[in-house]
Image (spheres, rainbow, N blue to C red):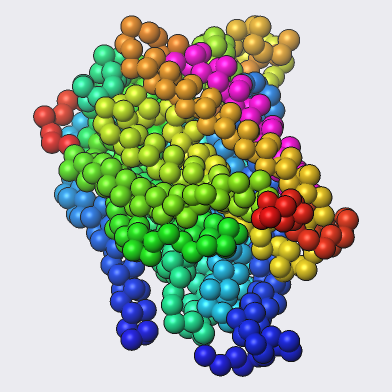
Amino acid sequence: MMFIRAYVFFLGVLATLFLGWAALTFIPGIQIKEVKPLPGLKPYTEQELRGRAIYIREGCVYCHSQQTRPDGFGVDQRRGWGRPSVPGDYVYDRPHLLGTMRTGPDLFNIGARQPSEDWHLIHLYNPRATSPGSIMPPYPWLFEEAEEAPEEFYRMQGKRVVPVPEQFRPEGKVVIATQEALDLVAYLLSLNHTYPVKAEKR
Amino acid sequence: MKSDHSIPGTEEAPELSYRILSDTSSSAPVIVFFTSAVVWLLVGTVFGLIASFKFNFPDWLGNIPALTFGRVRPAHLNSVIYGWASLGIAGLYVWLTARLCQTEVHWRRLLYISAILWNAGVLYGVVSILGGHSQGIEWLEFPKGAQTLIAMASVLLSLSILRTFYGRRVKHIYVSLWYILASVIWFPILYVIANLPFYSGVTQAAVNWWYAHNILTVWVTPAGLAAAYYFIPKVIGRPIHSYYLSLLGFWSFALFYNWNGIHHLIGGPLPTWLISVSIVASVLMFIPVITVAINHHLTMVGHFGKLRYSPTLRFVVFGAMCYTAVSFQGSIQALRSFNEITHFTHYTVGHAHLGLYAFFTMSIFGAIYYIMPRLTKWEWPYPVLIKFHFWLVALGITLYVISMTVGGFIQGLYMNDPSRPFMDSVQVTKPYLMARSIAGVVILIGHLFFIYLFYLMIKRKGVKRLTPPWYEKAEEYAR
């Protein structure tokens, strides 16, 4: 009797976990698997993927979501953050970066909202240079500092000088973007999901 | 049932000999688990505090890549979940299983290997995150190697516990043991399923949050409840109020809780039915929670005075009450109208700490206060420090949860007001984020008292006491 009860207990315990797994991940997985990439969605380029890896490395996901909500649930639409996102928008996302926090704004369409490469570079070097009051961390290790010289001088060497306002950079220095910074910005600019979507069921 | 290992002087009371037997055999592995848990508690607290101060002073330590917010935050989460919580749970489960099965701990060697692998996994994982090698999935940031170590460690732990259960000398399986057995079966399966490399896009988000919520279902909450079910009746000396409520509580918990996870993605790009199912399950959580709350309350009723005389009871009852609070909060938070405001805000962070700290961590503190003297044969040397520990962490976490709850709610209102620029929702949280950092400092100081006491216990140092803390007062109370 004692052993039968123990077996029933263990079976019950396994069954509850299995049920939850089947309902919440397996069945929706099948449903979502049929989702095709949307016609306007481009696969990431190699550079964008490198930038995406930096986005992951620096933990951007802990403060920025990449999912826009429909009207009637939050005001993402009225903020101009773009149409509600659908599963077809994420077909190339691995790992997913939906995020569950908005200490900073949503980035699902940041490439469309803020298409300036300069802005993003300055912002990553020191967020307060572009956005007073921001509490975002700076990422100085994505940049190099070099002796002040005309931009032309660095451009000749294939280096990208970032137009950081004087009060935000060390005296007598200019800020040069590393490849990593350029990759990350390329990824951010690729976050542009403004292509149309047929009224798709979510 | 016959005692195989009669200890002289206990012939008349075989249960007493079993108790000595189980405590003696569990002593070494449990001390190993608890000690490493406490080390991770300190590490995790420091990471948490650094992350918190970064909100207040975003340029502080701003040029050290390893200490940027986006790395320190997951380092905090992973060291407290897989380090402090998991190793604390392992210690609690080993000790409690032996006690409740009235037998010695079987396959102890597996436990030592488990402890080594577990610590190695967490260390490797945390260092990887700080070094920039995160997998980028919340709660599953550790690289594959670290995850493999932890998966192996958890299987070894489960094997030892199931073997000990198989060698039990009791007929009746106490409710704490239900939670433990379910937990040690669920956790390795869940952990392995969530780490399979098959997922991408929105499916991965579903698996991600199914897992992240379920680690509470299968691992953290059962441990807290097992502790409450064991220590409350034990300390006040009366049985749990109702066996049938326990039964209902357990099975409704097992059924509903692991359907909750997708409520983390309300409003997101997932099938609506899926989100609705999770919301319904989250509301159904009222059943197990109310059941457990009634059961514990009716057990405690008339005995609340004893809170003053038992550190264990104080911590565990605080934890049990917060379990009710956090579960109610969680169910309400899953409702669409409420979630619309609190989603994406610090409110969720407050909720997480109400659960993982005010409920779980406080319960484990209570358990450690009870268990350690029985393993080291040494009483807690300075009861006044226990008092400091309790009040500092109790006040600290209260301030923490209030500031994040209020601040997060206002943040959500601002975020949902299109006439305000988004930046307003950042600015308005600043004083609350500062209050949170202060709360974190208070909690850290509390932890330092606890860690000092714990160190004295292991070394059997400090004042030699013959009775448990506040025993004199308890005797007075009994008269």
Residue B47 image offset from top left, x and y in percent: 65, 39
Q: From the viewer's perspective, is residue B99 above or below residue B46?
A: below
Quick check: is B216 in the magenta stretch?
no
> Splitting the image into 4 quarters, where does residue B74 fall?
top right
Q: Nearer the viewer, residue A6 or A27?
A: A6
| Region of the chain picked out in magenta, as a range | B425-452
Q: Nearer the viewer, residue B266 or B466?
A: B466
Determine the residue positioned at 52% across, 67% down.
Answer: B154
Q: Nearer the viewer, residue A25 or A106?
A: A25
Q: From the viewer's perspective, is residue A38 above or below residue B407?
A: below
Determine the residue positioned at 31% across, 60% down.
Answer: B248
Residue A34 image offset from top left, x and y in percent: 16, 49
Residue A112 image offset from top left, x and y in percent: 33, 19
Quarter of the image that includes the C terminus of chain B: bottom right
Residue A19 image offset from top left, x and y in percent: 25, 61
Q: Is residue B359 left or right of residue B282?
A: right
Determine the residue positioned at 44% across, 29% down.
Answer: B347
Q: From the viewer's perspective, is residue B49 above or below residue B95?
A: above
Q: From the viewer's perspective, is residue B121 above or below residue A189?
A: below
Determine the residue positioned at 63% across, 14% down.
Answer: A153
